[in-house]
Image: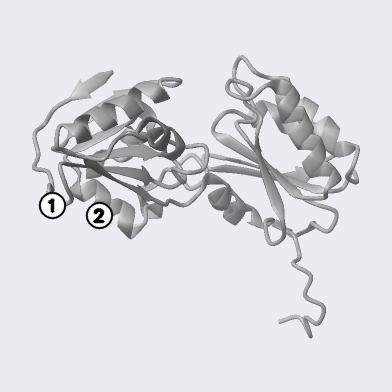
């Protein structure tokens, strides 16, 4: 656990210790909610994945900072709880929303016996919402979000979920679509979806949504293979349902309104 101690004063009015589980949004500070900013301001200690804490550098100056690299989530959560039990006001940060593939569930699992600290989850803008806004309006109807990482979920279960979502005609969001070591999951998932969708079904890839390095590709289910080299763990893939269509540079899934009248 990397630690940087710079002092700071805590807010002890909420009990012996307080722990905020903060969703910081997709990455840019412009997408932080007011509640998230307030929680970070109140906290004397910040805990999180090194990359995500770095995105908040202007907001955590002068605070006690604890960071770790990837795959050390349990360690981070344990540290945040330890600091809160010491009577400090702590914020543990997750990208997007802390309750969606984030730290909220793990903190609450580990803290089931804690009665001497106050825990509050602060919602954030989910990464798939940011990605969808870049593409247009692909999530206007029912959708399913599926992580393709088999680090915590068996591959067989992922395959079952992809097939079920494709069969049910959900718009599908793929989180964690590809890493340097895990390259087969996305092609396998796309092939499953192709069994249930037309070749011209719109598909979008958004990388670094709402960050300076943002990239976006709007293509089709038939052509998405051409862009696999642009996909990594900072990307999300969204595949439309049977009604999704492209309009210029937009990907749109209609909600089903019957009388739209004359176009504006």
Q: Secondary structure at mark 1?
A: loop
Q: Quadrant of residue 231?
A: top right
Residue tagged 2: 38
Total numbered labels: 2
**Can I make out residue 211 in this image?**
no
Q: Earlier in the sequence, mark 2 or mark 1?
A: 1
Which is more toward the observer, 23 or 59? 23
Q: Position of residue 249 (x, y in %)?
A: 70, 56
Q: Give 80 or 114, whichever is nearer the viewer.
A: 114
- In depth, the one of 225 and 91 nearer the eye is 91
**Residue reaching furthest to the top:** 181
Residue in the image at 20% along x and 49% along y: 41
Quadrant for the N terminus, please: top left
Which residue is found at the position 16% from the left and 40% from the top?
A: 44
* Distance of label 2 from label 1 (alpha carbons): 15 Å
Looking at the image, is 259 positioned above or below residue 234?
Answer: below
Q: Residues within 10 Å of mark 2 (few under 14, many from 20)?
A: few
Image quadrant holding the C terminus, namely bottom right
Mark identifier at residue 72: none
Q: Is 48 displayed left or right of 223 in the figure?
A: left
Could you tell me residue 11's position as x and y percent? 13, 48
- Residue 127 appears at what percent x and percent y? 53, 45
Residue 105 visible (yes or no): yes
The answer to whether residue 106 is above or below residue 25 is above
In the depicted structure, whether residue 84 falls above or below residue 218 = above
The residue pinned by badge 1 equals: 13
């Amino acid at each position: 656990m990397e630690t940087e101690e710079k002092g700071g004063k805590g807010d002890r009015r909420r009990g012996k210790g307080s722990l905020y589980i903060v969703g910081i949004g997709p990455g840019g500070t412009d997408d932080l909610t007011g509640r998230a900013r307030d929680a970070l301001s109140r906290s004397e200690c910040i805990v999180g994945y090194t990359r995500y804490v770095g995105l908040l550098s202007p907001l955590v100056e002068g605070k006690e900072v604890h960071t770790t690299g990837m795959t050390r989530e349990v360690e981070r959560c344990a540290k945040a709880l330890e600091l809160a039990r010491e009577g400090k006001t702590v914020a543990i940060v997750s990208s997007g929303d802390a309750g969606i593939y984030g730290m909220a569930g793990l903190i609450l699992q580990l803290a089931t016996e804690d009665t001497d600290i106050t825990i509050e989850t602060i919602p954030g803008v989910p990464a798939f919402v940011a990605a969808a806004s870049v593409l247009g309006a692909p999530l206007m109807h029912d959708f399913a979000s599926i992580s393709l990482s088999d680090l915590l979920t068996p591959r067989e279960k992922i395959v079952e979920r992809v097939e079920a979502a494709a069969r049910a005609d959900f718009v599908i969001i793929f989180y964690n679509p590809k890493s340097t070591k895990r390259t087969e999951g996305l092609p396998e998932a796309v092939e499953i979806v192709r069994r249930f969708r037309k070749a011209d079904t719109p598909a979008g890839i958004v990388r670094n949504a709402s960050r300076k390095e943002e990239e976006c590709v709007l293509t089709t289910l038939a052509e998405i293979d051409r862009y696999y080299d642009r996909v990594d763990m900072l990307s999300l893939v969204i595949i439309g349902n049977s009604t999704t269509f492209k309009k210029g540079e937009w990907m749109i899934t209609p909600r089903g309104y019957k009388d739209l009248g004359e176009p504006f």
